[in-house]
Image (spheres, rainbow, N blue to C red):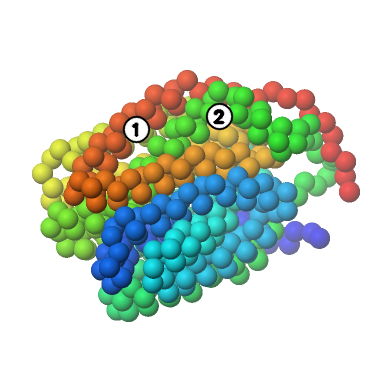
Amino acid sequence: MTTPAWRTPQIVLLICGMIITIAMGTRMTLGMFLQPMTVEHGWTRETFSFALALQNLVLGISSPFIGWVADRLGAVKVLCAGGAIYALGVVAMALSATGWQLDLSTGVMMGLGQACTTYTVVLGLLGRSFPPERRTFVFGTASAAGSVGQFLMVPYAGILLAHFGWFGALLTLAATSLLITPLAVLLLERRGSGAAPTRPTQSGAEAIREAFAHRGYVLLTTGYFVCGFQLAFITVHLPSYVLDLGFAPSVGVTALALVGLMNIFGSLGAGYLGQRYSKKNLLAAIYLIRAAAVALFILIPATPYTVWIFAIIVGSVWLATVPLTSGLIGQMFGTVYMSTLSGIAFMSHQLGSFTGVWLGGWLYDHTGSYRMSWLISIALGVVAALVNFPIDERPVQRELAPQATS
């Protein structure tokens, strides 16, 4: 089977960007349903928070396996299945009447759907479609697509909530998520052609062992935990934090939209800078900026303008870690097992997400405040900056062997 002439790497990037826009955009709207659903069903915030925390956990734990499947069987099949699972999960979320049903739908089903349709699979596909000198910028462009989704989908969900209520809004979001599957059908991974290519003389298991024996990969994965903690906590709890401050719901909606808007520029900038400067040093700088932004946010008197300024600063470094982390993995280990190794790193990210979402709800229910969660976020940001500095960015040297043509 040959690749159609129109399906150039640029077209693949465009379609992948549309998929990430829908998948990440829908995911970023879920915190907006916390208050209406908890009030309707009489749930605590911890109940809702746990379901979203479980979603992050399932997304993380399943990512290495799904990345391995994508590396072996192709990303298109994974993306098609993921779009259907994602949409069914959103429908099931709308129909949930108990905490365990919310856990199954929002936590398990949507977590699996997201693992199949977001960065682990998509960036692995793009990494094989573009040469190394363009890879980090392409990853930045794909990450920016996630922010376009947040910028567009958060106001979109706000309009749906205002006109159709939370139940109708979720059903409409489910229909929107289902668009991922026909988009994925348009994709076809490029396989090597021409002269016999080369491949590492290692299996997937050997690639994983090699990565975990590499100090830089372990440090990079450790820092990614902090990224997940910070992003998930802010995504889920910032709208409720803003309401607790006495501001209108539109303030929180605007803040999340600003995060998405600014991350378009932040992700593109990270991709551009990552092609020219040390990726590990850029990552350390991002974590320090986040820590400083949170510290200022909770120290100065709160107004709608301080909320929006905070969103602008944090949004500028929101998903900027993604192209740098994925680019660093590809730079050190190559792209043959990139989805697998990125999936393992992303599992650490999502363990952090689980912790951030669940701990935020637990601390709020037990202290009546989000202050402790903000302080933990600051401390973790400093730690993440420190662990990124010692990373060795040089490519791993290994023996190569010719791959037989079929």
**Residue 371 visible to an observer of this rendering:** yes
Q: Which mark is residue 132?
A: none
Dot 1, crowdedness within 10 Å: few (<14), some or many (≥20)?
A: many
- Residue 390: x and y in percent read 47, 20
The correct choice, above or below, for 218 with respect to 364 in the image is above
Residue depicted at 57% across the width and 50% down the height:
62
Q: Position of residue 122 (x, y in %)?
A: 58, 52
Q: Amino acid at mark 2?
A: Tyr
Depth-wise, is mark 2 or mark 1 nearer the camera? Answer: 1
Q: Residue at x 51, y 51 (%)?
A: 59
Q: What's under tag 1, amino acid-wise?
A: Leu
Q: Quadrant of the N terminus?
A: bottom right
Mark 2 secondary-structure assignment: helix
Q: Mark 2: few, some, or many residues within 10 Å (few <14, many ≥20)?
A: many
Alpha carbon distance from label 2 to label 1: 18 Å
Q: Secondary structure at mark 1?
A: helix
**Can residue 308 be seen at all in this image of the molecule?**
no
Instruction: Identify which residue, 226 or 62, lies in the foreground.
Output: 62
Q: As rendered, which of 365 and 80 lies closer to the eye?
A: 365
**Would residue 200 be found to the left or right of residue 280 on screen?**
right
In the displayed image of the protein, which residue is found farthest to the left? 301
Disc number placed over residue 380 in the picture, else none: 1
Query: In which quarter of the view is residue 30 placed?
Result: bottom left
Q: Is residue 203 above or below residue 237?
A: above
138 in relation to 133, above or below: below
Q: Which residue is mark 2?
A: 217
Q: Is residue 355 left or right of residue 200?
A: left
Residue at (55% x, 33% y) in the render: 328
